[in-house]
Image: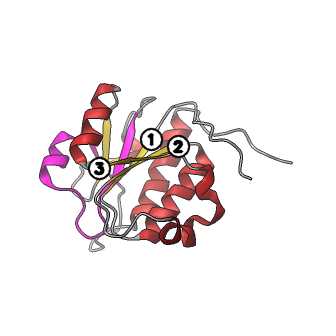
């Protein structure tokens, strides 16, 4: 049985906007579980949100993940605002490299749909739009890879990694 969820010291959250690919969502849930980062999944997804669809990449880590499902963008955004959290969007349309950004405890780091990112109304709502710099001529990274880059940097800056388990 996995350990109970223990949130990171920075109370960061990861938001998945209408994910298209269950393997990516499973990978992100696994990453978040290991790092102690709660996940907000904004529906509708491009697949049925079932254990079967997420388990291939998430393995047995899914039981250790803290997942909150939201019926739609409006429900997620209302909750985020009520909690006073900033929305940090990872996007190829961003101008600020993620390593130049000043993360704060409570930030919500969001990735968009693999096929289309996020719509303009979501883009305009974001408090910051970050990019992972890449070589010219290449379009984008996998959302799970991009989120791992940025979560790692945010946690490093906020000194929020879980303690090492050397046992």
According to the picture, the residue beneath numbered tag 1 turns out to be 13
The disc at residue 134 is none
The residue shown at (56%, 39%) is 156
According to the picture, the residue beneath numbered tag 3 turns out to be 71
Q: How is the image coloured?
A: secondary structure
**Is residue 1 magenta-colored?**
no
The residue shown at (26%, 41%) is 75
In front here: 79 or 126?
A: 79
As displayed, is residue 72 above or below residue 50?
above
Q: Considering only order in the chain, which callout, 1 or 3, is on the residue closer to the N terminus?
A: 1
As displayed, is residue 125 above or below residue 133?
above
Give the quarter of the image for residue 127. top left
Mark pair 2, 1: CA separation = 5 Å
Q: Considering the numbered disc 1 on the image, is that residue within a helix, a strand or a loop?
A: strand
Q: Is residue 127 visible?
A: no
Q: Position of residue 126 (x, y in %)?
A: 23, 41
According to the picture, the residue beneath numbered tag 2 turns out to be 37
Q: Position of residue 121 (x, y in %)?
A: 13, 48
- Disc 2 to disc 1: CB gap under 8 Å: yes
Give the quarter of the image for residue 78. top left
In front here: 37 or 48?
A: 48
Q: Considering the numbered disc 3 on the image, is that residue within a helix, a strand or a loop?
A: loop
Magenta part of the chain? 107-131
- Using residue 162 as the reference point, say whether residue 132 is left or right of it: left
How many numbered marks does the figure carry?
Answer: 3
Q: Position of residue 158 (x, y in %)?
A: 53, 32
């Amino acid at each position: 049985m996995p350990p109970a969820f223990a949130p990171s010291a920075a109370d960061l959250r990861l938001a998945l906007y209408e994910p298209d690919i269950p393997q990516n969502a499973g990978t992100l849930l696994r990453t978040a579980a290991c790092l102690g980062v709660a996940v907000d999944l904004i529906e509708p997804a491009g697949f049925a949100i079932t254990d079967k669809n997420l388990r291939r990449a998430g393995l047995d880590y899914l039981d250790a993940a803290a997942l909150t499902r939201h019926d739609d963008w409006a429900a997620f955004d209302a909750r985020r605002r009520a909690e006073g959290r900033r929305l940090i969007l990872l996007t190829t349309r961003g101008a600020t490299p993620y390593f130049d950004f000043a993360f704060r405890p409570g930030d919500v780091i969001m990735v968009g749909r693999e096929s289309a990112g996020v719509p303009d109304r979501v883009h305009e709502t974001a408090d910051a739009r970050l990019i992972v710099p890449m070589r010219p001529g290449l379009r984008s990274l996998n959302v799970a890879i991009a989120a791992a880059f940025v979560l790692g940097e945010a946690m490093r800056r906020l000194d929020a990694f879980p303690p090492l388990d050397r046992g």
